[in-house]
Amino acid sequence: MKKIIFLLIAVFSISLGQSQTEVGGATLPNNLEYGSEGLILNGAGVREKFWMDMYAGGLYLQSKSSNAAEIMKADKPMAIKLHIVSKMITSERMIDAINEGFDNATNGNTASISSEIAKFKSFFDEQINKEDVFDIVYIPADGVTVYKNGKRSGNIKGLEFKRALFGIWLSDKPADKDLKKGMLGK
């Protein structure tokens, strides 16, 4: 009987260990479900600034890919999970980073999605604390939905906006080159 219990505990522990990924002091699930869409962790990394970890980020896709341009263009379900690991992240700093990210991802051509960007930034108006988790989920029929700690913040429709948004992390001028490599599973 003791052997059976030990075996069950060992199997359960192994399966738990394989269902999550540790990165930058955060634990990211290897699989996510949004409605009927199942997504797998494509890759993960850490956003650093001044040699300090700011947040752990994971990219979730239907199937693995290392092609950033195709991921940004794709009109398929996908998500980015951001797990805040630093007390240095504030609402103001996050919004400044979002502005810079959209400028970099679009080469400064944000006019056509300026109202969508303003709405997206409003999702970060509330105080941000260490251990907060943001899920940025794109479902083609619904657009981009943002969740903070599992609570829905809002939704923005439009493929052009989604492409620019995912470009913050995956464009030629990403928020963090090492984080981009990590998200692409490299």
Image (tube, grey):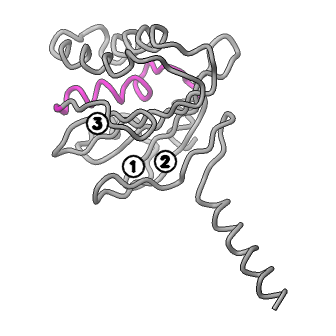
Q: On the image, numbered disc 1 is attached to which residue?
A: 61
Residue 35, percent across and down?
29, 55
**Earlier-in-chain disc, 1 versus 3:** 1
**Earlier-in-chain disc, 1 versus 2:** 2
Spatial separation of the CA atoms under disc 1 and disc 3: 15 Å
Label 1 SS: strand
Spatial separation of the CA atoms under disc 2 and disc 3: 19 Å
Q: On the image, numbered disc 2 is attached to which residue?
A: 42
Residue 29, percent across and down?
54, 51
Residues packed near mark 1 inside 10 Å, few (<14), some (14 to 19) or many (20 plus): many
Q: Which residues are magenta?
A: 157-178
Which quarter of the rendered picture does the N terminus lie within?
Answer: bottom right
* Residue type, label 1: Leu
Residue 134, percent across and down?
44, 33
Residues at discs 2 and 3 in contact (Cβ within 8 Å) = no
* Residue type, label 2: Asn
Q: Quadrant of residue 109?
A: top left
Main SS, magenta region, reads helix
Label 2 SS: strand
Which quarter of the rendered picture does the C terminus lie within?
Answer: top right
Q: On the image, numbered disc 3 is attached to which residue?
A: 145
- Residue at horizontal 33%, vertical 33%? 146
Residues at discs 1 and 2 in contact (Cβ within 8 Å) = yes
Figure disc tally:
3
Q: Is residue 176 magenta?
A: yes
* Residue type, label 3: Thr
Q: Is residue 4 left or right of residue 36?
A: right
Label 3 SS: strand
**Earlier-in-chain disc, 2 versus 3:** 2
- Residue at horizontal 71%, vertical 67%? 13
47, 5: nearer the viewer = 5
